[in-house]
Amino acid sequence: MENDVYTLKSVEETRAFARNLGTHAKSGDCFALDGDLGAGKTVIAKEIAAALGVTEEITSPTFTLCEEYEGRLPFYHFDLYRIDDPRELDMLFFEDYWEGNGVSVIEWAGRAEHRLPRNTTYITIEYVDENTRRLSIAYPSD
């Protein structure tokens, strides 16, 4: 996997970065987001969705675990914060989403262990200060 690190100095830079990811997203792409509470995982998910043409309000699906939206491609937004045991993922059948034609964004993706597809882009968000975030990105190799 190719790795990059970006320091984004404002919410606007973070949004622009995420919107760029969504603009270039293609069918079957998966983005795995990890970072502390308040680091910006949902901000990134919202901007990817917006770039895909999703017009509905995107909220973190902490209690439902998955929300589906329509855009130029289907958008699947997962939040695994409440997953305590990896076996709980068996009840989600979320692997089925990756075999379709949509784009998946998974918050708290570390809780999915080794279940994510090979084409996953891993994004770790580090809170630096109120406006600054450091993003470590591992892109899938082709």
Image (cartoon, rainbow, N blue to C red):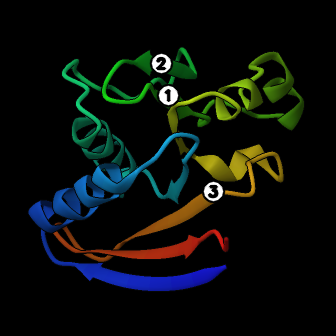
In-front residue for pair 139/61: 139
Quadrant containing the N terminus in the rendered view: bottom right
> Which marked residue is nearer to the observer: mark 3 or mark 2?
3
On the image, which quarter does residue 118 sit in?
A: bottom right
In-front residue for pair 121/80: 121
Q: Which mark is residue 123?
A: none
Q: Give the percent coordinates (x, y) of residue 86.
A: 84, 37
Contact between labelled residues 2 and 1, with CB atoms less than 8 Å apart: yes
Earlier sequence position, callout 1 versus callout 2 = 2
Q: Amino acid at mark 3?
A: Thr
**In this picture, residue 2 sits left or right of residue 92:** left
Q: CA distance from mark 3 to mark 2?
A: 19 Å
On the image, which quarter does residue 127 sit in?
A: bottom left
Contact between labelled residues 2 and 3, with CB atoms less than 8 Å apart: no
Earlier sequence position, callout 3 versus callout 2 = 2
Check disc 2 and report the residue beneath it: 67
Q: How many discs mark residues in the rendered view?
A: 3
Secondary-structure class at tag 3: strand
Q: Residue at x 72, y 46 (%)?
A: 111
> Which marked residue is nearer to the observer: mark 1 or mark 2?
1
Secondary-structure class at tag 1: strand
Q: CA distance from mark 1 to mark 3?
A: 14 Å
Q: Amino acid at mark 2?
A: Glu
Q: Amino acid at mark 1?
A: Tyr
Relative to 36, say whether 55 is above or below: above
Relative to 111, say whether 3 is above or below: below
Q: CA distance from mark 1 to mark 2?
A: 6 Å
Check disc 3 and report the residue beneath it: 120
Q: Give the percent coordinates (x, y) of residue 10.
A: 12, 69
Q: Residues within 10 Å of mark 1 (few under 14, many from 20)?
A: many
Check disc 1 and report the residue beneath it: 76
**In this picture, residue 35 sits left or right of residue 47:** right
